[in-house]
Amino acid sequence: MIATLASPEATVETLRWRHSRLELIDQRVLPQQFSYVQCDSAAAVADGIRAMVVRGAPAIGCAAAYGVALEALRQRHKDPQKFSTGLDCAFKLLSTSRPTAVNLFWALRRMRKAWGNIEGQNPALIADVLLAEAHEILAEDIRINRSMGAHGAALLSDRARVLTHCNAGALATAGHGTALGVIRSAVESGKRILVIADETRPFLQGARLTAWEMVQEKIPVTLITDNMSGHLMSTGEIDAVIVGADRVAANGDVANKIGTYMVAVMAHRHKIPFYVACPLSTIDLEIREGGLIPIEERAASEVTGFREWQWAPEGVSVRNPAFDITPAELVTALITEKGVVTQPDQHNVAALFN
Ligand code: MRU
């Protein structure tokens, strides 16, 4: 059975704060089941990020912010010294949950700054301030996605057939989405868009999550396996590509879900625009170029099978890099909350922060 939202108007709440706990949609079991995992500590949130209960760069950042707030609430009755030590441990634990999406480190830096502003105050007050900051990061993410959506929607023509890879939708953010946010905004503005969703081996974020989001909202979607997009480009069935990003280097190189690079190369060959929707929190000015971005290597079991199924022989050697790097020269434009940056390079990327 495929899970459906309570009503067609209901929006996906990837993360929500309920009864002093963080609830995360369990993205491992979608679309067969729609359920929430409850987290009451930084350790529980870090486990959820590591296990991909919650995934997608902005959603990981939001979850980590709540992880800090939860730990502060949990430890607020301790004396200030023990409270600080406990909170420091929470920051360390959360920072090791996944390596590539820079939004995780961006959110932790922001939480540390909020703490730094009131360091020395009593722990209960610090906990309240950190929870308010986590709420603000979540609300801000939705506003930013809507703003990216407005900028990006203008790039899509009516009846455009748009390929996307992985899931850069509401499930990958606090709501609306980055790449799918652009598509949602275009649809809201009256454009008829056909989404072509790559399956996205091995974790199947495209087949399970993007397809589910689009079906829920009745946005037309066609699912393909990852090796079909080149063929569809060659037959003129794709007008544009939009993906999200996990980290964008200072020179505009893009780390995104494994397979993105292949799509970008094919799009370039067929002169199809290749857009990357990313909030400024995904841009890492401290990383000069894409080759320096840490790429997560995940478990072999994701490649040798899926869930309880295993199809590869026992003992086979496996590689499972979860992300790849698309050089800036293959990116037609970055779509950010501050506007569209065509042909990204070191100068126009830096200008976004002025
Ligand atoms: O491994 P995941 O599912 O966390 O990877 C997610 C992606 O690669 C997304 O494309 C990216 O985070 C953009 S999210 C709006």
Image (spheres, helix red, strand yellow):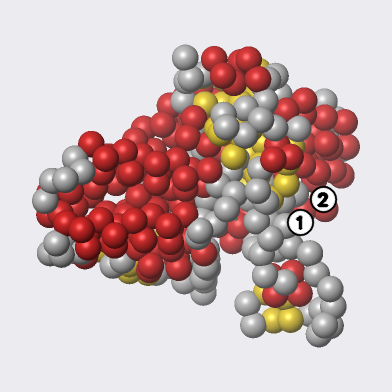
Drawn side of residue 341 relative to residue 3, left or right: right
Label pair 1/2, CB-CB below 8 angstroms: yes
**Percent from the top left, x then y, of residue 242?**
64, 35
Q: In this view, does 64 lie above or below 29?
A: above
**Percent from the top left, x then y, of residue 146?**
42, 31
Whether residue 13 appears in this view of the structure is: no
| Residue bearing mark 2 | 228
Q: In this view, does 269 lie above or below 60?
A: above
Q: Which residue is rendered at x = 77% and y = 29% of the image?
A: 330
| Residue bearing mark 1 | 225
Residue at the farthest front position: 81
**Percent from the top left, x then y, of residue 309?**
69, 81
Q: Residues within 10 Å of mark 2 (few under 14, many from 20)?
A: few
Element class at badge 2: helix
**Percent from the top left, x then y, of residue 150?**
47, 24
**Image quarter of residue 147:** top left
Front one among 187 and 320: 320
State the CA–CA distance, disc 1 to disc 2.
6 Å
- Total residue callouts: 2
Which numbered tag is attached to residue 311?
none
Front one among 217 and 257: 257
Q: Which residue is rendered at x = 47% and y = 35% of the image?
A: 281
Q: Which residue is rendered at x = 82% and y = 53% of the image?
A: 227
Front one among 168 and 74: 74
What is the three-letter code of the residue carrying label 1? Thr
Q: Is residue 249 above or below residue 120?
A: above
